Image (cartoon, rainbow, N blue to C red):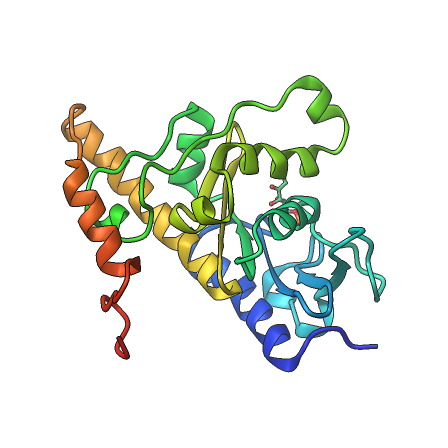
Amino acid sequence: MTYGSPALRRAVLLANQTIPEAGLAQLTWGNVSGIDREGGFYLIKPSGVAYHDLTEDHLVPVDLATGKVLAGDLRPSVDSESHRAFYLAWPSIGGVTHTHSTNAVAFAQAGRDVPVLGTTHADTFNGPVPVTRTLTPEECATDYELNTGRVIIETIGDDEAAAAIPAALVANHGPFTWGATPQKSVEHGIILEAVAEMALKTLALNPNAATPPHLQERHFKRKHGPGAYYGNPTA
Ligand SMILES: O=C(CO)[C@@H](O)[C@H](O)COP(=O)(O)O
């Protein structure tokens, strides 16, 4: 049995291939998934498969309710349980991306949020991109990936909060991003890496740099508020 519409299979493959194209991870690090909510499953990158070898037939269908593989011999990404936790917690999302992009990982390893220092950040993230607390020894010892998902949900909050800030940094690990589609989730990963690099350089020039709240709010509303037109030719 083939799981996923041709459109979903193509979208998840292309989103995964965007990770190395955008320089968001080395080797086989990172992974992207996309969900079929009516079918009750998601497609995710198989574990350890090189991006340049990846085909639609490699994508692993995973049951949303149980986390079990529904077809094929390949193992899902080690991060599958984190993806599944987000799909269960946030009904509006359609895709999840995990990367090891350098500047975002630097913030995750330093235990620092990515601050809002300009409109580039505010256009996509309506506030600092938070770093989670460190997982406890018990959380690391059992169900690490599920607990990684849980600590991000604990940090971000509900579905509305996840739409306002579609990204988080797992302490000492790296970024997860999400969005309405697989491609949107990886685009948020690209933007996160860009604003993390900008923030690092800005703070090196001026450790007291900050964005006035009114500027942050205006820019986020311009792109996401009622009647938003920015980047939306049909609005
Ligand atoms: O964050 C991690 C591991 O900590 C992952 O990104 C791996 O680096 C890739 O694992 P697979 O998706 O290939 O299982």
Tell me if 165 is positioned left or right of 133 in this view: left
Q: Residue at x 64, y 44 (%)?
A: 82
Q: Please name whichever residue, 121 or 76, is drawn nearer the observer in this view of the structure.
A: 121
* Residue 207, quarter of the rendered image: top left
* Image spot of residue 158 (x, y percent): 51, 43
Residue 233, given in percent of the width and then of the height, sits at 26, 77
Residue at left offset 55%, top offset 32%: 154
Q: Where does the N terminus fall, quadrant-wise?
A: bottom right
Residue 218 location (% of width, % of height): 18, 50
- Measuring 82% from the left and 54% from the top, which residue is drawn there? 68
Query: Is 7 on the left-hand or right-hand side of 47?
Result: left
Q: Is residue 65 above or below residue 210?
A: below
Q: Say how many tags the image has.
A: 0
Image region (quadrant) for ligand 1? top right
Residue drawn at point x = 39 percent, y = 54 percent: 190
Q: Nearer the viewer, residue 180 or 203?
A: 180
Q: Going by the image, does 156 lie left or right of 55?
A: left
Q: Position of residue 91 (x, y in %)?
A: 58, 56
Farthest residue in the front direction?
A: 226
Quadrant containing the C terminus in the rendered view: bottom left
Q: Nearer the viewer, residue 154 or 45?
A: 154
Left or right relative to 148: residue 143: right
Q: Is residue 226 above or below residue 107?
A: below
